[in-house]
Image (tube, rainbow, N blue to C red):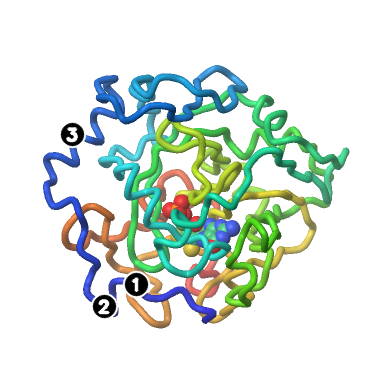
Amino acid sequence: MTNLPPEDQQKPAAPEKTPNPRREFLRSATLFTGTVAALGGGLELLSRRPGAVAESVQPGLIGQAKRPLGPYDAKDAVTPYEQATTYNNFYEFGTDKADPARLAGTLKPRPWTVKLDGEIKKPMTVDIDTLQSWFPLEDRIYRMRCVEGWSMVMPWLGFPLAGLIRRMQPTSKAKYVQFTALLDPKQFPGQKSAVLTWPYVEGLRLDEALHPLAFMAVGLNGRVLPGQNGAPLRLVVPWKYGFKGIKSIVRITLTEKQPKTTWSIATPSEYGFYANVNPKVDHPRWSQATERRIGELGRRPTLPFNGYAEEVASLYTGMDLRKNF
Ligand code: MTE
């Protein structure tokens, strides 16, 4: 199978467990008011100190998350953590949405190194905790729109990609950024199947990567990023379809030429390099005009650039977005 399934547009939507919208609102709201009741002991949380790494603290501290400012806060109700961590696409664990949560225990996010190389002044391999300590951690609440026609609202913890790119000191030849995920069939049982070419790779144009919305996540809902969501380091590009958000990154390479990307290798006629959310450009097999927000009934209209047009549309001035899908 080399195609993302058209999900709910070809079969009835899977019944959600959360039909009570008021309760959902309260759940989302409590995340930010410090009134979260005991969630069970021993959760690993991240503190907001610059350079904080995983540490075990009382679950109640989850309420210290702050709503960030402006476009960094999607304003929408946050998707409940249990849904954001059990309905996942992570083909390294399998093609079923439930596979990643079921199998993510095989992924060992520490120790972990990230290779920084290509068109940069000083290539290096850096430990994830050192890399994380270079930047203060920030909260971002971003919409995430999957190309399959569903969406979530995710409270990420991490740092802007631009800071990392600047620290890498690009040479004048650097025009693109390539991201590579871990290749290890022992940790990723799905890599024993040829469903995609491995490792998973993704890319951005350098100006996209330098945009303040482009983000590297190390946490979710105030906790260390779970394996199924891409531990220990994943990309988040909220104006693009979710497949651009490569998980479990081990290498970041600045390149002169446009890098290959996993889904465009698999099906170039369906998944392009840019993958900007665009309700006017349908997928060849289904409409992109609407989406199902996980936890909601019915469908809502999809917004150009996933609602971030004001911030990012100028990156694509003069480009034919039908050709550059
Ligand atoms: N990253 C890797 N390494 N492997 C994958 O299969 N799937 C992508 C993206 N990143 C994927 C990946 C797709 S299709 C989507 S929609 C998002 O991850 C889903 O992210 P989430 O499970 O955290 O919601």
Residue 26's disc number: 3
- Identity, as a three-letter code, of the amino acid under mark 1: Glu
Secondary structure at badge 1 equals helix
- Choose top left, top right, bottom left or bottom right for residue 204: bottom right
Give 171 or 55, whichever is nearer the viewer: 55
Q: What x and y, as percent, mark residue 72?
A: 42, 35
In the image: residue 62, left or right of residue 175: left
Could you tell me which residue is drawn at 46 percent across and 73 percent down? 4
Could you tell me which residue is drawn at 56 percent across and 71 percent down? 272
Whichever of labels 1 and 3 marks the residue nearer the N terminus, that label is 1
Could you tell me which residue is drawn at 74 percent across and 41 percent down? 113
Give 46 or 102, whichever is nearer the viewer: 102
- Asked if marks 2 and 3 touch (Cβ < 8 Å), the reply is no
Report the residue that reaches farthest toward the right. 122
- Asked if marks 2 and 1 touch (Cβ < 8 Å), the reply is yes
Secondary structure at badge 3 equals helix
Report the residue that reaches farthest toward the top. 49
* Residue to which mark 1 is pinned: 7
Vertical comparison of 28 with 255: above or below: above
Q: CA distance from mark 2 to mark 3?
A: 30 Å
Residue 11's disc number: 2
Q: CA distance from mark 2 to mark 1?
A: 7 Å
Whether residue 317 is visible here, answered yes or no, is: no
- Identity, as a three-letter code, of the amino acid under mark 3: Leu
Could you tell me which residue is drawn at 34 percent across and 21 percent down? 60
In the image: residue 92, left or right of residue 73: right
Q: What x and y, as percent, mark residue 116?
A: 78, 44
Q: Is mark 1 within 8 Å of ligand 1?
A: no
Q: CA distance from mark 1 to mark 3?
A: 28 Å
Q: What x and y, as percent, mark residue 119?
A: 83, 49
